Amino acid sequence: MQVFLQTFIGGVSLGAIYALVAMGFSLVFRTMGLVNFSHGNVVMIGAYIASTFYLSVKLPFAVAMVIALGLTGLIGVFIERVLRPLENKDFDLMLIGTIGFGIVLEAVAIIIWGATGRAVPNPVAVAPVQIFGLRIRTYDLVVLAITTAATLLLVYFLQRTKRGAAMQAVAMDHEAATAVGIHVGRSNAIAFMLGAALAALAGGLVGPLLYVNPSMGGMLGIKGFAGAILGGFGSIPGAIVGGIAIGVLDSFAGGWFQGYSDLVTFLVFTMIIMIRPTGIFGERTVNRA
Amino acid sequence: MFSSVRRRAAVLFLALATPVVLVACAAPGSDNNNKQNTEGPIKIALVDAQSGQLSSLGAWELKGVRLAMDEWNAAGGINGRQIELGIFDDQGDPTVGTNLARKIAAEGYIAMLGTAESAVTIAMAPILKESKIPNITSGQSPGLVAVKSPFLFLNGPTSTTYDETLAKYIVDTKGIKSIAMITNNGGYGKGEHDAFLKALSSRGVTPLDDQVVTTDQKDFSAALTTIRQKNPQVVFIGAEEVQSGLIVKQARDLGLTVPFAGAAPQGTPVFVDTAGVANAEGSIVSSPYLSNDINDATKKFAAAYKAKFNEDAELHGAKAYDGAQILFTALKNNKGATGEALATAIRGTKHAGLLGNFAFDDTGVGIFATTIGLIKNGKLVSA
């Protein structure tokens, strides 16, 4: 029982990170119908910026995170601006464009920070919380709290603000949205910016849990993407549930199937998707392509 | 020379950005070399992970090789010919490795140094054997020996040696019999798993627990909690630097306080940084190169390394330096012969290196001893 619960806790902790990554994927997809394949690499850039300001500039971790969110958000805006001429023209090219950006971001990270990577010390150096023989890292609780706050803010923005409502409108019918005076390009730029900021949040938070290096985006991107698909691509609650589900699934597969855990994780994932192709929350907001 | 290095740097950069395009460019027939050529620079390939999670190994190896090469070139090269180093990035990926093996064969490199990843080297070995290109690797998996290629040599001991020394220390010297294992299922981890298990069973010890993780795994809660419940006195790790560090860090968070034991990766600064200095304290390490202060040769090497790269030398740089010295010595003694003659020359080279005295046997292993060290305050010291 103790192993079971401890495994669950370990899964939720990384799952919260996957959920943040999945939210970024979903936000861009629901607004533009585009899968941003550079998203994993944006996570990596976010992790590097946060760790640089934390380790090299020696700012407090929270301040470093805020700076990383801002700077990475700007990178998101830049990516959208470069790809904008392709919007409504050639969607496949836009898709390939995001793959290209991913490769460029990895190369840029190698030029700036080198290929070797760095370890980020835990910013919340407090002993783990102990309940009934279970141990929960204090840092994991921080990650969960931040993920919850980010989700609530995002949902509030999308449902309660004018700009958020405009983004929903673009997602539903971008021509009709244009007709009523909504700037589609700006709406897309905001989606990319928020997506990149979420990526930076995930990257910055995962730094102390893992090891920051230029190729870390691959694994996080794939797990986050799988989480978004599992929850229902385009759905924000789906991204949260899907991301955490992938983390927990991974953790249990690791415990029960050891060396075959990746195989089992993705077999289960494939089976769920075959039974329920639209994911748990079954939302497919756009199909613009 | 300088422009050549710059060109290599540009090629390396391109290789990172567009591996697919580059591989497509390495068409057969694009080589303009002549294998009997005894004029011009001697082309040696260095293949390693220069990107990805294993890239610190590649960076160390490159530094060790470059130090040896610059010393030889400054002294007039090999029989008057300069050494030219081609640097290739295998990304720690066996598939990329096999493509690179074909590429270095096509481009007329006469020998290869690296890789530091056993799985990649094992994948490349058949192609290098077919092309008759001798390869001195930094890998240490017994799987390298099992390939049985007469062109494959190791610049250090295999896991069998590392883990025999480790088991001897833990079981025979310390009298500890309750031992748990956690290893990954990659080329290196698998080799460590089998070698340590063999060393234990030859002493009549059965591990309390034997957990296997994947090379990509990041969360070890299940494995480590299971291990903690078995209450071992020592946990053996068979995984690369970063993963070992993550395992130890998570183990301490999960309340597993006993020391960890392992081979070369656990003696590196990357391991200590990833785990955290306090968490790594007391780790038992089996290594053929415990510190830079073993003898005059290692002190000289460490000083030159520090002067050139402004960082402290460690095992992997030293191994690579030894491997490069052996290759260059063989080339010198053999008047720049290539192919089978060069492999025979390497096998016959007796070298007093930083790791000890190299004398290669038929399996391509030249050194058979490691010593035990402990991590104290983030540094590896003799036990």
Image (cartoon, rainbow, N blue to C red):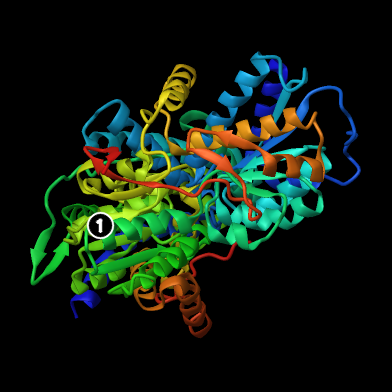
Instruction: Please say if B160 is above or below A73.
Output: below
Residue at (12% x, 48% y) in the render: A126
Left or right placement of residue B79 versus residue B260 in this view: right
Would residue B282 be seen by someone viewing this image from the given angle?
Answer: yes
- Residue B302 placed where, x, y %? 43, 24
Residue A170 visible from this viewpoint: no
Residue A169 in the image, given as x and y percentages of width and height: 45, 58
The residue under the point 38% across, 29% down is B292
Q: What x and y, as percent, mark residue A254? A: 38, 71
Q: In the figure, residue B74 lies in which quadrant? A: top right
Residue occupying the point 30% across, 58% down: A155
Mark 1: give few (<14), some (14-19) or many (20+) Cα within 10 Å: few
| Quarter of the image where one finds residue A68 | top left
Point 51% across, 62% down: residue = B186
Judging from the image, mark 1 belongs to the subunit labelled: B
Residue placed most toward the observer, A135 or B34:
B34
Identify which residue, B49 or B331, lies in the foreground: B331
In which quadrant will I find the N terminus of chain A? bottom left
Number of dots carrying numbers: 1
Most distant residue in the bottom direction: A275
Query: Relative to the observer, which residue lies in front, B22 or B40?
Result: B40
Is B179 on the left or on the right of A202, as rendered? left
Disc 1: which residue: B173
Return the x and y of residue A22 as percentages of the image width and height.
41, 60
Position of the C terminus of chain A, as image quadrant, is bottom right
**Callout 1, which amino acid?**
Thr
Q: Does A157 sit above or below residue B256?
A: above
